[in-house]
Amino acid sequence: MVLLTQKHALVIGGTGMLSAVSLWLAKMGYKVSVIGRSKQKHHELVKHADNPTLINSLCLDYNNHSILENEVKNAIQLNGPISLVISWLPSMQLLDTVNRLVSQYIDDWKLYQVKGSRRYFIVDLLNVPQNCAHSSIYLGFILEGNQSRWLTNAEMADGVIKSVQDERTESIIGTLHPYEKRPSY
C-alpha cells in the first residue's frame, strides 16, 4: 500500500556520482527510486542510507528501453507518483520516455537534468511536458591556478543538491569558461 503523503523521487544514475543526492533525498523524506547498472553500487547505496527502506533499487541498464519503461511504471505503482526526477541520462529518447511516464501519473513535477559541459553549447531538443518544471544542471570544471581539473563526485552531488534546494532553472557547477582550459580526458 502506498502512503499518499510519501514523496517519490527518481534518480537516474543515482548509484555513482549522484549517490549522495539519492541519500540526501531519502533524508529529506522521499521514497527514492534509483536507477543504476551495478548491483554492487546499489548494495553500497542501501548500506549507507539512514533508512534503507526509502531506497528502491532499480538495477538495470537504462539503454534497454522496454526494461526502463517497465521498471519506472512498477516504481510508480509501488511507491506512488514521482514528483521529482534527477537525471544523468544522455539519451533524449529515453528521457522523453521517462517524462511521458511520470507526466501520466501526476499533475505537476520537477525534472533536474544533469548534463556534461559540452551540452551547455548545444541546443537541447528534450520534449518537456507542460506539467513539468525543467531545470538544467551543467557539470563544468575547476580552475586551480594554471591548471584545471574535473569536478569530484562530491562537488557534483553538492552542486546538484544546492540546485534542487534553490529551485534553479539553470545551474553551472564549477565553470565552463574559458572552455579551452577544461581538462583533457
Image: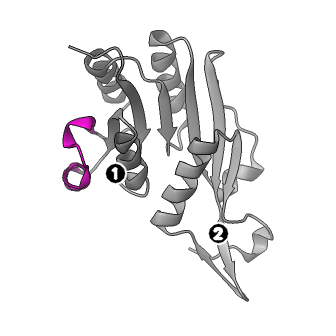
In the rendered image, the quadrant that contains the C terminus is bottom right
Residue type, label 1: Thr
Can you tell which quarter of the image residue 8 is in?
top left
> What percent of the width, then of the height, locates residue 109?
55, 22
**What residue does disc 2 label?**
141
Residue sitting at 40 percent across and 48 percent down?
24
In this picture, residue 150 sits left or right of residue 136: left
Disc number at residue 15? 1
Residue sitting at 34 percent across and 41 percent down?
26
Query: Can residue 31 be seen here?
Result: yes
Which residue, as the protein is rendered here, is positioned at the far right? 178
Can you tell which quarter of the image residue 11 is in?
top left
In the rendered image, the quadrant that contains the N terminus is top left
Q: Secondary structure at mark 1?
A: loop
Give the magenta range. 39-58
Can you tell which quarter of the image residue 126 is in?
top right
Q: Is residue 52 magenta?
A: yes
